[in-house]
Amino acid sequence: MDLDLDTGKLIVFIAGFGFFLALEHFASAHPQIQPKIYRLGVHGTIAGINTVLVRVLTFVPMLAWLVYVEQQGWGIARWLGLTGWLEFVISMIVLDAFDYFWHRANHRVSFLWRFHKAHHSDTEMDVTTALRFHPGELLLSALAKASWVLIWGPSAIAWFLFEAMVSLCAQGHHSNWDLPDAIEARLNPIIVTPRFHATHHLVLRQYGDANFSTIFSIWDKLFRTEAARLKGAEILACQFGLPDDRARSMSLINWLSEPMKQSNLQLSRSLRTPKG
């Protein structure tokens, strides 16, 4: 069953990536300077490196931990006796809340930001940006997720469904496309849309240090971290990424060495401007 779940997650990833790659090709929201094939090559290499490291260092221990916690009956979900679809739905909501706080911590804690800014250093934004993470962040994230498993105690099926949904949503809201204003207005208060997350990747930190949600946007509203909403045209007038080393944003050496640079967390925050 574990192999089937893992294979299913891979199928969701490949299908989602292909779908959003095609979608942004035919209905892109903003022009891009870097050739798509170049971005696919660089970010595909990053994804390959990360996949090998995660498989070797964290996949088996995480799976064993997940099964062990479930067998021991640990976690709030087990204590509440949640099973079936109810457990799947509630686990999705609770784990997404954990993910919100983890993402927020990656922006607020200087040590974590050193790794996370490798993701934000991309000066353009498309579905390949969803592949751009520093391996150090993924290893730290694995430790954080191990604590989520202990606290909540999701079933293996619920956990893999959550992981697959996070992957699919990340591809969708990093992609270079936009929803019509009428649909955006209805979906934005509930789920993370491409426009909602594009705001999170802007250079201006009044936006970049906000909108931390991954699946459900309710967390930013509930905890008052939602940025002022921008229209598609307003996002087009802004820059993506970080203010420093923009010319080297696609350098693999620059990406890998990002945590060793002096943290630009304070520099980035100094670029805040009053909300209009």
Image (tube, rainbow, N blue to C red):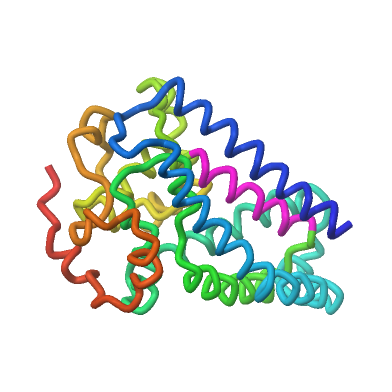
Name the residue nearer the viewer: 153 or 268: 268
Query: What is the quadrant of the N terminus in the image?
Result: bottom right
Q: Position of residue 38 (x, y in %)?
A: 41, 43
Query: Which residue does the image show at 81% across and 64% down from the upper left?
Result: 81
Query: Which residue does the image show at 35% across and 22% down from the upper left?
Result: 181
Name the residue nearer the viewer: 46 or 6: 46
- Image quadrant where residue 24 sits: top left
Q: Is residue 55 above or below residue 216?
A: below
- Image quadrant where residue 263 sits: bottom left
Query: Which residue does the image show at 72% across and 49% down from the upper left?
Result: 9
Q: Name the dominant secondary structure of the magenta segment.
A: helix
Q: Position of residue 54 (x, y in %)?
A: 63, 68
Query: Which residue does the image show at 68% across and 73% down from the upper left?
Result: 56
Question: What's drawn in magenta, residue-wise?
Answer: 157-172
Q: Tell me if 85 is positioned left or right of 243 in this view.
A: right
Q: Is residue 208 above or below residue 77?
A: above
Residue 217 falls within the magenta-colored stretch: no
Name the residue nearer the viewer: 258 or 220: 258
Q: Position of residue 166 (x, y in %)?
A: 58, 50
Query: What is the quadrant of the C terminus in the image?
Result: top left
Q: Is residue 68 above or below residue 275?
A: below
Residue 164 falls within the magenta-colored stretch: yes
